[in-house]
């Protein structure tokens, strides 16, 4: 019998393509949104109606949430009533603490730090197991003005860049065809915007924009200490419409671990289109979390690397076009 999944926010860009990916993998999908549709696989859900949300979540094996609700209603419903939810939104630190506290007495499991970035965190966790002496990690996110990240991705990138009037930079040794790029360090000035550590090891986050011309302009604004003044529309113009297909633009993310400022290991995560890869990763996570070798389903708010390892999903994500590769280790090349 096919597994069942409820995709909240299925009318948006990410939700649309996550729905398609689950369907292609043989899942029975219920699409949930706030705008009425006549489609038989669609369910109109008011996230502010506890009874409606509770019933919808109880009818499926898995809930995938792609929208941030100010009351955290989907997450709280699953924690309280039972079931499993994969969260693809960005929790602030206070929200994370609140859900962790409520989940301690709950019945359901909410899985955080997922999506495409979740694969990077699993890779960093694996590197740290191989190098327990490491005391720091680095992670570079790549975003595109060409639409590979969708509107939500554009808003996220804008928030990271405008959280400060100036960001430190570092040279990131991307493989060809990208090559070395000077990237902006982000995350320090935004509460809860990025995961702060894997295990006990802190992470420095960098951001790189595509195309190069746009990134060069961001670097110039950063040098002039004007980057915090960029309007949201600079990133989101024309991004509201759900496209027929996501772009296949090449995306590459880079991560490394180090000790005392010396890098010990580097890897890259590559594929086509940030949202395309996020959809593929989400299905792989769902299959691993509900499969025959499923991890302990202890209730509460838990990060993806507390539940599965990269080895658990590597075949599935590589079959879907996501490539993880070890890189030659480079020395640190920080510059303000």
Image (cartoon, grey):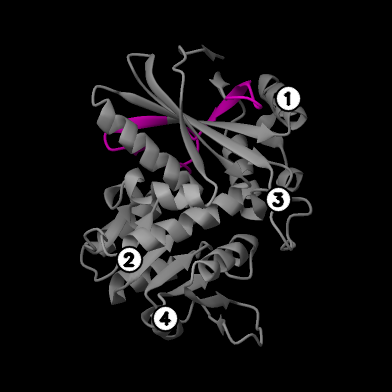
**Closer to the eye: label 3 or 1:** 3
Counting residues from the N terminus, which is met first, the one under dot 3 or under dot 4?
4
Up/down of 316 relative to 8, above or below: above
x, y percent for residue 260: 32, 14
In the drawing, what numbered circle is on residue 50? 4
Please report the residue visible at 27 percent of the width from the left and 64 percent of the height from the top: 292
C-alpha span from label 1 to label 2 = 44 Å
Residue that numbered label 2 is attached to: 290
C-alpha span from label 3 to label 4 = 37 Å
Q: Indicate the quadrant where residue 223 lies.
A: top right
In the drawing, what numbered circle is on residue 247? 3
Local crowd size for mark 1, using a 10 Å CA cut-off: few (<14), some (14–19), many (≥20): some
Local crowd size for mark 4, using a 10 Å CA cut-off: few (<14), some (14–19), many (≥20): some
Please report the residue visible at 57 percent of the width from the left and 83 percent of the height from the top: 41
C-alpha span from label 4 to label 2 = 25 Å
Counting residues from the N terminus, which is met first, the one under dot 1 or under dot 2?
1
Please report the residue visible at 42 percent of the width from the left and 81 percent of the height from the top: 50
In the drawing, what numbered circle is on residue 216? 1
**Closer to the eye: label 3 or 4:** 3
Pick whichever, 105 or 147, lies toward us. Answer: 147
x, y percent for residue 196: 38, 37
**Closer to the eye: label 1 or 2:** 2
**Closer to the eye: label 4 or 2:** 2
């Amino acid at each position: 019998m096919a597994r069942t999944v409820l995709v909240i926010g299925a009318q948006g860009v990410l939700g649309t393509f996550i729905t398609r990916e689950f369907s292609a993998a043989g899942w029975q999908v219920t699409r949930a949104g706030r705008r009425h549709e006549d489609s038989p696989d669609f369910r109109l859900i008011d996230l502010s109606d506890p009874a409606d949300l509770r019933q919808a979540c109880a009818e499926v094996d898995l809930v995938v949430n792609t929208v941030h609700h100010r009351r955290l209603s989907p997450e709280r419903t699953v924690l309280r009533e039972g079931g499993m939810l994969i969260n693809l939104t960005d929790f602030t630190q206070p929200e994370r603490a609140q859900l962790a506290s409520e989940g301690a007495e709950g019945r359901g499991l909410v899985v955080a730090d997922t999506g495409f970035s979740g694969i990077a965190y699993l890779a960093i966790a694996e590197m740290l197991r191989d190098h327990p002496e490491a005391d720091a990690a680095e992670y570079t996110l790549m975003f595109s003005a060409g639409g590979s990240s969708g509107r939500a991705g554009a808003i996220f990138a804008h928030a990271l860049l405008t959280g400060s009037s100036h960001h430190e930079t570092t040279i990131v040794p991307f493989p060809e065809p990208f090559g070395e790029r000077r990237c902006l360090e982000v995350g320090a000035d935004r509460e809860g915007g990025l995961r702060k550590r894997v295990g006990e090891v802190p992470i420095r986050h960098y951001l790189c924009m595509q195309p190069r011309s746009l990134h060069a302009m961001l670097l110039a604004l950063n040098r002039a200490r004007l980057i915090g003044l960029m309007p949201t529309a600079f990133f989101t113009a024309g991004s509201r419409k759900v496209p027929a297909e996501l772009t296949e633009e090449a995306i590459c993310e880079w991560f490394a671990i180090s000790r005392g400022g010396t890098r010990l290991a580097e890897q890259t995560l590559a594929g086509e289109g940030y949202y395309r890869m996020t959809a593929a990763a989400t299905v792989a996570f769902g299959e691993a979390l509900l499969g025959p070798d499923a991890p302990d389903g202890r209730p509460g708010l838990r990060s993806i690397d507390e539940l599965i390892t990269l080895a658990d999903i590597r075949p599935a994500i590589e079959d879907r076009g996501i490539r993880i590769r070890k890189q030659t280790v480079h020395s640190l090349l920080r510059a303000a």
